[in-house]
Image (cartoon, rainbow, N blue to C red):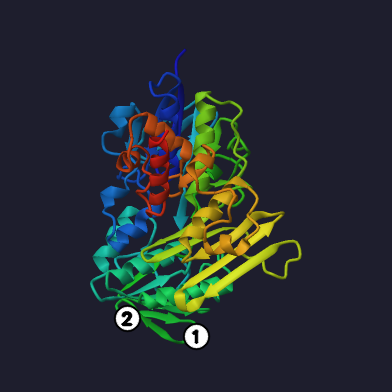
Amino acid sequence: MSPRSVVIAGYGMAGARLADEIQRRDPEGERVRLTVIGAEEHTAYNRVLLSSVVAGTMRPEAVRLHDDEWPSRTRADLRRGVSATSIDREARRIHLDDGSTVDYDVLVLATGANPWMPPVEGLEPGPDVVAFRTLDDCARILDAARLGAPVAVLGGGLLGLEAARGLAGRGNLVTVVHPMPHIMERQLDAESARVLTRKLEELGVVFRLGVGAARYVSGDGLKLDDGTHVPADLIVVSTGVRPETKLAMDAGLTVEGGIVVDDLLRTSDGRIHAIGDCARHPGAFGGLVQPAWEQAAVVADLVTGTKSSSRYRGTQAVTRLKARDIDLTALGETMTGADDPTAEVLTFSDPAGCRYGKLVLRENRVAGAILLGLPDAAASITQLYDRGTPVPEDRLAVLLGRALPAGAPSASSPADLPASAVICRCNAVTKGRLVEAWRGGATDVPALAGATRATTGCGGCKDAVGGVAKWLAAQ
């Protein structure tokens, strides 16, 4: 039986992960003949870690997901620097901008999202206006951000704050301009945002909140809509993204804010799937890598035939701010207040110490949390959330990350974790994957990192990976 032709349109984090998942299930290429199409010249890289490149804590080559030998090693037909221009659904053929075509049995759209440029007078992409999205954007930012130069960051969301912290750490005078009353309004309540703002101010970041940019003059800076002025030699734009759906729309697929997919990640054409930021599924959150990688595993199961019952039911997403000297985790219901009669809500605020904790419980289980400057609590609460296990009676001990009461189930003991527990969220590495790599010969933390990329992201999982390694060694 000849292998099926599977074409992945998009070589970002979702497309590259899908290619890896297919290769893991079909290492000899007996079931799938794989073609991957990527618009960028680079090999796939971890977009989550770009703020570390800007901060100077990671080199560009360290964030690569594939090396240059990946295509020859896996027998994948990788086409870099080309884009898909149209889909002929009847002929099952995709057309590329270099004039070539690729036939498919299954097509997977992993086209991602494009940065949104706000309609500000004078604000046009150029040497001093960069939308922070790609590895090339990092290079442009670093070229323009001379030591001590003033930089304005438009957008106080996750990526904007990571860029601001990185540039401030390099010695730039950074001002974050955000039109909302507080930063990270999608993930944080007002009090936690206030504490985080204070922490970032201590690290050299200036904030202009509740005000928008009205006009940009190159070489001068931003005029804000309250009439004030922000000097800036460089503007870093991080004001959100829009799903890349043109290819799907032109092909007549159903698009409603994203390419609509079902639990098999199928579009309105059963031979075409969509994953990642370009896709719209009711259980997925845009802008996070974890849903995309979970979706990639489902599609790989289906196209290789290894698990025809595989379905994507949604993601319990956990957001982490990856910035030096800051430990922030937000998950689930972060906006639920103490006045909600259906929930149990505990809060702890220490603005002077730049610490904040919020724990939301429903039916004795974690429904949401915000944890700033409380890394031990973040580790335990995240595992309780992932597993859906009851929370120990001493809620304060849980919220503050203290030792749990005697006899309470430990959420962070490797022996108690299921194989599906995510240990490294930057790279979506589960306990099961670490065990698999260990059995394959990766018997210490550096070897596990090389085999799975765990710990190579923000580094927040290093202790957890070390704990799994010690547990395995003791078996």
Q: Residue at x 43, y 48 (%)?
A: 464
Per the image, label 2 sits on a secondary structure element best described as loop
Q: Amino acid at mark 2?
A: Asp
Read off the residue under disc 1. Answer: 226
**Position of 373 relative to 96 (above/below):** below
- The percent position of residue 208, horizontal first and vertical second, equals 46, 79
Q: Residue at x 42, y 82 (%)?
A: 223
**Position of 283 relative to 335 (above/below):** above
Read off the residue under disc 2. Answer: 220
Does the residue at mark 1 contact the one at mark 2 (Cβ under 8 Å)?
no
- The percent position of residue 216, horizontal first and vertical second, equals 39, 76
Q: Quadrant of the C terminus?
A: top left
Q: Amino acid at mark 1?
A: Asp
Task: Quote the CA–CA distance across marks 1 and 2.
Answer: 17 Å
Q: Residues within 10 Å of mark 1 (few under 14, many from 20)?
A: few
Residue that sits furthest to the top in the current view = 1
- Residue 458 relative to residue 233: left or right: right
Per the image, label 1 sits on a secondary structure element best described as loop
- Nearer to me, 289 or 198: 198
**Mark toward the start of the polypeptide (1 vs 2):** 2
Give the image quarter of residue 99: top left
Q: Residues within 10 Å of mark 2 (few under 14, many from 20)?
A: few
- Nearer to me, 76 or 96: 76
- Nearer to me, 30 or 327: 327
Residue 276: which numbered mark, if any?
none
Q: Can residue 101 be spotted in the picture?
A: no
Q: Residue at x 26, y 67 (%)?
A: 144
**Position of 298 relative to 148 (above/below):** above
